[in-house]
Image: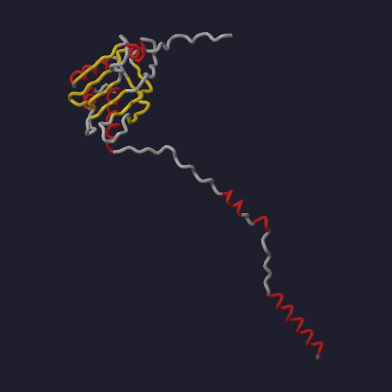
Amino acid sequence: MVGRSIAVAAIVSLLAGACRSTIVPPPTSLIPSPSSAESALPPPSSPSTDLFSVTGLEAERIASVVRFVTAFNSARLDDASAVFADDAALNDCDFATHEIVEARGRAAIRAWLIQRFADHDRLVIARIFNMNPDPNSNQSAGVDFALRTSDTIARLGAPNGFAPQGEAKVVFEPTGQRIITFANAPGGAARGVVLNTCSVPDLTSPPAPTAS
């Protein structure tokens, strides 16, 4: 009787062990540590430095400059002259004579444009910037040109054009719609400044020999 009780107890013990599940912990090598998990994430992106902001009026003035240069380069007389006010004034360099030419009024500006078109004059904008940040003033824009080409410029020694010195100053009507001044030459400057600005660098000359 005692032996039967011992046998029954042994069987119950075996059955209880068979029904009990055993949890095997995963290898520690498969559990990512906080440092390794963080290193797997992509680094945070840096803030963009390409942001800019202009007011609506500034945008209109920038658009006017771009419209003028685009029409100028395409020899579209009506479109190029349309950006100017009726009594607008303009000056520019005559690179052949090293002098400043001036035009006042829409008719005179159109005559100047016809001459520039005949010379296959072209302008490439480098940047447009605000020359007068005072919001209460009649703001003007500055324009740097990266390149200017023309038949005259090529004949004077720069067949591929050159980057003009100084910037053009563009003054707008208070509404910002039309240009009242386009100064592309140093009007009123000393003769030496005019001569330097209105001269084409000789880019056809061979480079000077280097010292051995």
Foreground residue among 26 and 198 = 198
Residue farthest along the bottom direction in this orientation: 1
Foreground residue among 164 and 16 = 164
Q: Residue at x 26, y 35 (%)?
A: 136
Looking at the rendering, which quadrant does residue 191 occupy?
A: top left
Residue 173 at x, y percent in the picture: 22, 30
Q: Residue at x 39, y 17 (%)?
A: 162
Q: Residue at x 28, y 23 (%)?
A: 72
Q: Is residue 36 left or right of residue 148?
A: right
Residue 152 at x, y percent in the picture: 33, 12
In the rendered view, would you say 151 is above or below 129?
Answer: above
Residue farthest along the right direction in this orientation: 3
Q: Quadrant of the C terminus?
A: top right
Please indicate, yes or no, whether residue 73 appears anywhere in the rendered image.
Answer: yes
Residue 42 at x, y percent in the picture: 54, 46
| Color encoding of the figure | secondary structure
Please indicate, yes or no, whether residue 151 appears anywhere in the rendered image.
Answer: no
Looking at the rendering, which quadrant does residue 198 occupy?
A: top left
In the rendered view, would you say 86 is above or below 33?
Answer: above
In the rendered view, would you say 192 is above or below 7?
Answer: above
Total marks placed: 0
Q: Quadrant of the N terminus?
A: bottom right
Q: Is residue 197 left or right of residue 136?
A: right
Looking at the rendering, which quadrant does residue 197 occupy?
A: top left
Residue 21 at x, y percent in the picture: 67, 71
Foreground residue among 53 and 114 = 53
